[in-house]
Amino acid sequence: MPRLVRALRGAVTVGQDTPEEISKQVELLLREAFDLNDIASGDLISVFFTATSDLTSAFPATQARLALDICDVPLLCSRELDVEGSMSQVIRVLIHFYTNLERSEIRHVYLGEAASLRPDL
């Protein structure tokens, strides 16, 4: 069976703007996404992070490299749009990967208060 390119989304809230807390939450988010979708590091194509403007102490991509040792995968960070009334202290992720899963089988991951961003999941 051919391997397909798929993408999954996720988000997590961060309780404090510290490198340790960002690292902890990024690792938790990625491990959950990888486990639920049976993703190994060799399956990864790229990982794109965004963070709300109130998170300034660390780059989520750097924390992911350190925590999960995925140094050979392109990782990128960007600032989330400042939309009035939007949730604060959120890190979002878009993961591109190879898999045999159908699109409908992909399990997106929203943790902590970020679960309210996608109640349909």
Image (spheres, grey):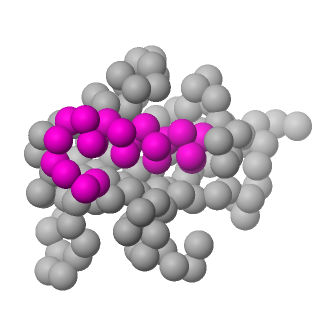
Q: Position of residue 46 (x, y in %)?
A: 46, 35
In this orientation, which residue lies closer to the viewer: 71 or 64? 64
Residue drawn at x 65%, y 42% is 35
Name the side, left or right, on which 66 lies relative to 1.
left
Can residue 75 be spotted in the picture? no
Which quadrant: the C terminus?
bottom right
Q: Position of residue 105 (x, y in %)?
A: 74, 59
Say whether residue 32 is magenta.
yes
Name the side, left or right, on which 25 lies relative to 77.
right
Boundaries of the magenta span: 14-34
Name the side, left or right, on which 83 lies relative to 2.
left
Say whether residue 23 is magenta.
yes
Say above or below: 100 vs 121.
Answer: above
Say above or below: 120 vs 45.
Answer: below
Residue drawn at x 56%, y 32% is 44
Which quadrant: the N terminus?
top right
